[in-house]
Image (cartoon, helix red, strand yellow):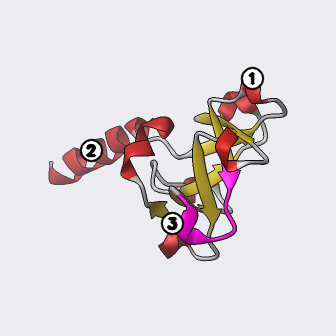
Amino acid sequence: MKKTIFTLFVLLFSITTKAQKVFSVEYASQADVKIFVAEYESRADLVVYKVDYESRAGKNDGNWFFVDYSSRADKKIFFVDYASQSDIIIYFAEYSSRAGWKKKEKMQLFY
C-alpha cells in the first residue's frame, strides 16, 4: 500500500513539474523575455547553467535546457546587444552549483 501511494505521488509530481526549457527566437517580437548576457556574474539578475539533458533542467532555478523547437519551450527568449534593451540580465556559469537568482523580483518573468 505504501509503495502504491509513493508511486502515485511520484507520478503526479513528475506531471506537474516543468523543466525550464527555453528556445532562442530570431526576432525580439517573438520573444517572451529579452535577455542580455553579462560578462561578470555580479551584474546578473540570474546565473544560468546550460544542462546537457532535458531531464536535468530545473524549475525556474537557472538550470536551462535549450530545445530545438519553439513549441517545446516553456519560454521563448531573444538575446539583445545592450543591457538597456533587456528584461533580464543573465550570466552563463561553468558549474550548475552557481545557477540561481540574484534578484528575485524578476523571477516572475519565467513563470
Evaluate whether residue 50 shows in this view: no
> Going 55% across and 60% down the picture, which residue do you hit?
44
Give yes or no for contact between labels 2 and 1 (Cβ–Cβ under 8 Å). no
The residue singled out by tag 3 in the image is: 99
The residue singled out by tag 2 in the image is: 9
Residue 97, placed above or below residue 18: below
Q: Residue furthest front?
A: 84
Image location of residue 90, percent across then percent down: 60, 56
Among the two numbered marks 3 and 2 on one chain, the one whose residue lies closer to the N terminus? 2
> Going 69% across and 29% down the picture, which residue do you hit?
31
Residue 19 is a magenta residue: no
Please indicate whether residue 74 sits to the left or right of residue 72 in the image: left
Characterize the local packing of mark 3: few (<14), some (14-19) or many (20 or more) Cα atoms within 10 angstroms: many
The residue singled out by tag 1 in the image is: 29
Among the two numbered marks 1 and 3 on one chain, the one whose residue lies closer to the N terminus? 1
Q: Range of the magenta residues? A: 36-44
Indicate the secondary structure of the residue bearing disc 2. Answer: helix
Q: Amino acid at mark 2?
A: Phe
Residue 37 is a magenta residue: yes
> Going 76% across and 43% down the picture, which residue do you hit?
80
Image location of residue 78, percent across then percent down: 73, 39
> Going 33% across and 38% down the picture, which residue do you hit?
12
Please indicate whether residue 91 sits to the left or right of residue 17 in the image: right
Q: Nearer the viewer, residue 55 or 24?
A: 24
Indicate the secondary structure of the residue bearing disc 1. Answer: helix
Characterize the local packing of mark 2: few (<14), some (14-19) or many (20 or more) Cα atoms within 10 angstroms: few
Among the two numbered marks 2 and 1 on one chain, the one whose residue lies closer to the N terminus? 2
Q: Nearer the viewer, residue 12 or 68?
A: 68
Mark 3–mark 2 distance (CA, rounded to whole Å): 28 Å
Image location of residue 1, percent across then percent down: 15, 48
Q: Nearer the viewer, residue 95 or 90?
A: 90
Give yes or no for contact between labels 1 and 3 (Cβ–Cβ under 8 Å). no
